[in-house]
Image (cartoon, rainbow, N blue to C red):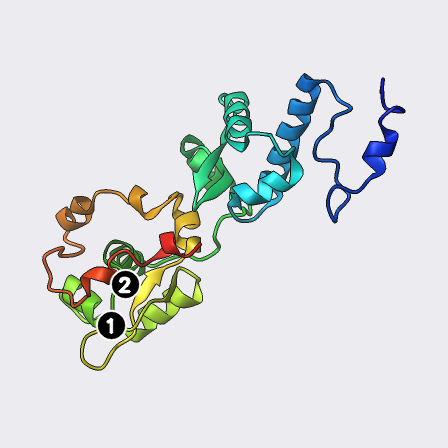
Amino acid sequence: MAGGGAQSGRRARPQQETGLDRELEHLPAGLRWREWMMRVEAVIFASVEPVRRETLARVVGANCSIDLIIDDLREELRNRPYDIVPVSGGWQHRTRSAYAPCILASDASTRSVPATLAEHEAAVLMAVAYFQPVTRGDLSKIFGKEISRDTIANLRADGFLGPGPRSPTPGAPYTYVTSKLFLSAFGFETLRDLPDIEALEDAGLLNRNAHIDVAPDQAAVGAEDDE
C-alpha cells in the first residue's frame, strides 16, 4: 500500500501489549474509518456476551467515536436480518425478531442462552427484576403462594439471579437480584427497559400491591449497579 514503507517504523512500535496498530495513521481517513468499523463489528460478532465500550476502544484509535462507529454499522445492517443492539451496557449482534420463526423452524443450534425457563420460573424472574432486592418470602407474597427454594435455585444455576444484600427484616433473610445475563438474555439494555408491570398484573401473574419488606434505600440495587 502506498506510503506503507514510510510508516513501517511507526507500525512496528507496539501500541498495546497485543502490538495492534490502533491509530492506523498510514491509511487515508476514509479507509481508516472503514477498518475501525470492521474491527468493532468483528469483536461484537465474535463475543458471546455484550461488548462494552472500553473493550471496543482497545481496537480503534484514541479519538475514534464508538457511538458513531456503531451508528454507521447499524445503518449498513438496516436491510439485513440482524442488527447490533445495545444490551446490558454494551452491544451485541441480534437477529431481528421478524426472523425468529424461521430460526425456530430450522432447528439450528444458536448462540442464545441455552436455559429454557418454565412459565412459572419466567414469572418469578420477572418479579425479581421489578421488585429487587427481594426475598423468597417477598416473592411468595407477590404471587399469593409459596415460591419454592428449587425455583430460586434453578434461576441461580442458570445464571439469571444473584445474591443481593441481606434484608433488614427479622432474621436478615437473603435477597435476590437479577444478573447481567438476565439483561442480555432478554435483550434489555438496563432495567429501565422492562415492559410495563401492568401487563403482568393484568395476566394475574403478580400483585404490585403486595406488602414487601424492602428498605427504601435498597430499591435500586440490581443488575444496573453491577458494573
Q: Quadrant of residue 170?
A: bottom left
Identify which residue, 32 or 155, lies in the foreground. 32
The kind of residue on which mark 1 rests is Ser
- Residue occupying image coordinates x 19% and y 68%: 138
Residue 180 sits above or below residue 43 on the image: below
Q: Looking at the picture, how far across and down is residue 189, in whole percent? A: 39, 43
Q: Give the vertical position of 146 relative to 52 (above or below).
A: below
User: Residue 194 is drawn in which quadrant?
Assistant: top left
* Residue 102 appears anywhere in the view: no
Label drawn at residue 200: none
Residue behind mark 2: 133
Q: Amino acid at mark 2?
A: Pro
Q: 10 Å neighbourhood of mark 1: few (<14), some, or many (≥20)?
A: some
Counting every numbered tag in the picture gives 2
Crowding at label 2, few (<14), some or many (≥20) Cα neighbours within 10 Å? many
**SS state under label 1:** loop
Q: Are marks 2 and 1 in contact (CB under 8 Å)?
A: yes
Q: Position of residue 52 (x, y in %)?
A: 52, 44
At which x and y percent is residue 82? 50, 31
Q: Is residue 74 left or right of residue 179?
A: right
Q: Residue at x 18, y 75 (%)?
A: 169
Question: 171 or 188: nearer the eye?
Answer: 171
The residue carrying mark 1 is 167
- Where is residue 35? Give x, y as percent: 68, 27
Between disc 2 and disc 1, whose residue precedes?
2
- Left or right: 21 with respect to 197? right
Q: Secondary structure at mark 2?
A: loop
Instruction: Check the image and name the residue furthest to the bottom.
Output: 171
